[in-house]
Image: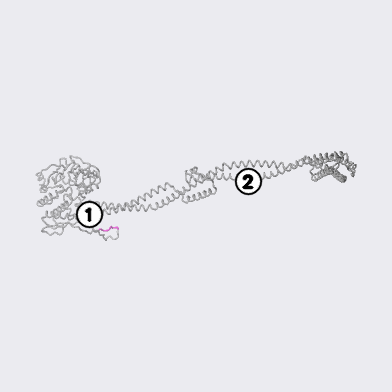
């Protein structure tokens, strides 16, 4: 950067805006004492960030503001602007590289507050210092030498002298970066410590929340499993209950109705069973039995008659056989006048057969066929009688048979059979009637008994059915009670499920049903109970709150962990940068110190006409006492301080210590050193505020000659009363006090300057 102007407004004695244009390599400022010349140098200090008001000849910040005069009032603020041309070769600051001009400004207010600016934009002092450091303008202000400060480099401590050298070498930027890095490192270490402490502090809570989250996750898994089980269990249970509700009440009513019918029927049959056998049936039966006994007696008599007839017929048959045992086999009856023996035998045999049938039927009580047999027997006898009557030649044919006796026997048998037949017909009729009556009575009795037996058996069967139905009804009633209890349990389980797994429990209605298995359903119920116990053991955890808190705390822990890693990385990088900076500082300081010594020796030789001068790097032991609160008060701590010492040797004079130099010698030595410092990394400007005041004319000429050499690299602003110092200036400003009490500038010719210099 190249200095082009400085503007002062309200700064100390410069009440009005005053502009010093720095157009030449050497600009002189002259004026009488008290005119405000030195205020220009202090304005440079001010805008470049000087924090010590004392170094600017003030006590408070308000002392830097115009106090007012008879002609002008007191001002409320002071402002100074430095304008630099941003040369292309110097554009090493990326922030302001594109600006053709850089204006540094500082404004102070009556309350002591300050505003810094770069090109009209408010910035921090740090930003000003960083920009200046890039352009070899350090905070030691070795490039601004005010009245009485020419020999301050000699009177400075070894540490301060080292800082001046670092400023001159342009190492302040590295030193500043090193300090900034050290501050950052301290901050990083502190942040790491705090982050580690914070992480240790929250670690138990993170662990606790992690366990809670694990519980939540386990609880979620268990609730998910429980939800699936509930969906299956509730769906099957509801379907089963609905199925039972549609069947059991209907079954109960049906059984109840059927039981009522059976009970009524039992009552009816029981009442019927209690009725005695009807008297009519008994009377009819007795009468029929008496009639049968009577008719059987008569029948026996008839049978005996029949037997007697049979006997007689046998005798007749024998007689006939005897009559037929004659000479001839046949007896002529019709055409030839004979009767066959075979025909007679057949008649006898058929009558005998019928008679045997009558006897068998009677013995076996098959009375219903007796009348027919009697009629058949009657017809046979009648046929045999007709046969005998129609025989015309019986006497002539049967010579050996007593025909008359046979006829008489036949007639008698015919008559007996007729009577027997008539009696038999009557008896048969009456017996059939009695048998019919008895049969009817017995059938009525048997029917009644059968009905009574049927009724009794039916009552027994009905009572068995009644007992069975009562059992079924009781079982159905128990099932209905159990169904009601099961439904109540289902509703309670549904309510409990709603609490445990929320409204999603209603999704069980969408579950696909499988055939109901009581065993499987019981297993589901048991498993649900086990899951509920496990969930209960886990305890109630507010999922949202725990999750939110865990995410927050774990996020904080992760953030701290990442921050610690980042800080460790930053620490390593900072330590690396600091090590590189220390290496750079050490290398460049050593090289720069050699260069400074070269210039120092040259300027010293010019000033003193010979002799030697150099800067020596030393380590000085510094003693620091312990505080009064510590036990060993007398024991001191030792601290090593690195610094710069000045070693000079004058021609033709033995000097062991710099303090042995005279005032003029010290001034020349200081100026030589300051000039040497300015040549290593020349700053954009160098301000010399009456640094030649202690020089005699001879030394002033030497001083002026050196200025020409210095102006080759830096713009010089020389505030002086010395004519020899004015001689190398290319432009000159005169500063005087205006009638209103403020400082003002005017163009000054060199001759006029000589007047000011007298």
The residue singled out by tag 1 in the image is 585
Instruction: Determine the CA span between mark 2 and mark 1.
Output: 112 Å
Res. 576 visible in picture = yes
Residue 411 on the magenta span: no
User: Mark 1 falls on what kind of element?
Assistant: helix
Quadrant location of residue 335?
Answer: top right
From the image, give the main secondary structure of the stretch colored magenta: loop
Compared across the picture, whether 390 is left or right of 550 comes to right
Look at the image and give the residue range highlighted in magenta. 624-629
Q: Nearer the viewer, residue 564 or 37?
A: 564
User: Mark 2 falls on what kind of element?
Assistant: helix
Contact (Cβ within 8 Å) of mark 2 with mark 1 = no
Q: Residue at x 54, y 46 (%)?
A: 516
User: Residue 471: which disc?
Assistant: 2
Q: x, y (%) of residue 459?
A: 69, 44
Q: x, y (%) of residue 408?
A: 89, 41
Compared across the picture, whether 219 is left or right of 601 comes to right
């Amino acid at each position: 950067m190249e200095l082009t102007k400085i503007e002062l407004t309200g700064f100390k004695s410069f009440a009005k805006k005053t502009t010093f244009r720095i157009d030449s390599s050497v600009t002189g400022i002259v004026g009488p004492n008290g005119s405000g010349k030195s205020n220009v140098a202090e304005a440079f200090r001010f805008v470049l960030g000087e924090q010590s008001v004392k170094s600017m000849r003030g006590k408070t910040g308000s002392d830097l503001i115009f106090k007012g005069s008879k002609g002008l009032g007191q001002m409320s603020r002071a402002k100074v602007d430095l304008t630099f041309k941003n040369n292309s070769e110097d554009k090493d600051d990326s922030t302001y590289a594109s600006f053709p001009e850089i204006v540094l400004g500082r404004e102070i207010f009556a309350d002591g507050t300050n505003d810094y600016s770069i090109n009209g934009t408010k910035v921090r002092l740090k930003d000003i210092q960083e920009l200046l450091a890039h352009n070899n303008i350090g905070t030691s202000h070795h490039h601004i030498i005010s009245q009485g400060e020419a020999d301050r480099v000699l009177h400075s401590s070894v540490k301060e002298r080292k800082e001046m050298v670092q400023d001159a070498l342009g190492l302040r930027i590295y030193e500043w970066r090193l300090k900034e890095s050290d501050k950052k490192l301290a901050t990083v270490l502190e942040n790491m410590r705090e982050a580690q402490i914070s992480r240790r502090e929250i670690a138990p809570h993170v662990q606790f929340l992690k366990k809670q989250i694990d519980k939540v996750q386990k609880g979620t898994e268990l609730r998910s499993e429980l939800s699936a089980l509930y969906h299956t269990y509730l769906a099957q249970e509801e379907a089963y209950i609905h199925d039972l509700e549609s069947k059991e009440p209907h079954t109960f009513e049906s059984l109840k109705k059927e039981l009522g019918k059976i009970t009524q029927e039992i009552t009816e049959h029981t009442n019927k069973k209690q009725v005695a056998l009807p008297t009519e049936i008994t009377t009819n039966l007795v009468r029929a039995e008496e009639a049968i006994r009577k008719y059987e007696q008569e029948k026996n008599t008839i049978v005996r008659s029949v037997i007697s007839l049979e006997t007689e017929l046998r005798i007749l048959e024998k007689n006939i056989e005897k009559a037929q045992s004659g000479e001839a086999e046949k007896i002529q009856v019709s055409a030839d006048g004979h009767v066959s023996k075979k025909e007679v035998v057949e008649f006898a045999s058929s009558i005998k057969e019928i008679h045997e049938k009558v006897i068998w039927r009677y013995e076996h009580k098959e009375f219903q066929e007796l009348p027919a047999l009697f009629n058949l027997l009657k017809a046979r006898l009648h046929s045999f009688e007709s046969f005998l009557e129609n025989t015309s030649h019986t006497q002539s044919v049967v010579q050996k048979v007593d025909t008359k006796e046979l006829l008489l026997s036949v007639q008698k048998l015919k008559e007996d059979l007729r009577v027997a037949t008539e009696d038999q017909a009557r008896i048969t009729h009456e017996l059939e009637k009695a048998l019919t009556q008895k049969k009817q009575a017995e059938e009525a009795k048997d029917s009644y008994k059968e009905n009574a037996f049927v009724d009794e058996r039916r009552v027994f069967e009905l009572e068995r059915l009644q007992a069975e139905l009562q059992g079924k009804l009781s079982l159905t009633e128990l099932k209905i009670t159990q169904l009601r209890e099961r439904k109540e349990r289902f509703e309670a389980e549904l309510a409990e499920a709603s609490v445990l797994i929320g409204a999603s429990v209603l999704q069980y209605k969408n579950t696909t049903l499988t055939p109901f298995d009581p065993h499987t359903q019981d297993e589901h119920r048991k498993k649900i109970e086990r899951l509920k116990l496990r969930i209960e053991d886990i305890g109630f955890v507010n999922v949202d709150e725990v999750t939110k808190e865990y995410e927050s705390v774990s996020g904080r822990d992760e953030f701290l962990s990442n921050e610690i890693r980042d800080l460790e990385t930053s620490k390593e990088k900072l330590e690396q940068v600091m090590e590189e900076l220390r290496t750079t500082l050490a290398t460049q300081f050593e090289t720069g110190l050699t260069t400074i010594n070269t210039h120092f020796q040259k300027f010293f030789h010019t000033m003193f006409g010979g002799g030697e001068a150099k800067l020596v790097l030393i380590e000085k032991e510094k003693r620091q006492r312990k505080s009064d609160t510590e036990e060993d008060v007398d024991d001191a701590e030792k601290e090593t301080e690195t610094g710069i010492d000045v070693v000079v040797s004058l021609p033709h004079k033995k000097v062991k210590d710099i303090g042995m130099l005279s005032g003029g010698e010290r001034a020349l030595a200081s100026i030589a050193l300051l000039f040497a410092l300015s040549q290593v990394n020349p700053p954009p400007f160098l301000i010399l505020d009456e640094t030649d005041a202690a020089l005699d004319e001879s030394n002033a000429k030497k001083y002026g000659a050196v200025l020409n050499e210095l102006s080759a690299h830096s713009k010089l602003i020389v505030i002086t009363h010395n004519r020899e110092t004015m001689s190398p200036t290319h432009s000159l400003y005169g500063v005087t006090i205006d009638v209103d009490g403020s400082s003002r500038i005017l163009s000054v010719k060199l001759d006029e300057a000589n007047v000011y210099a007298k």
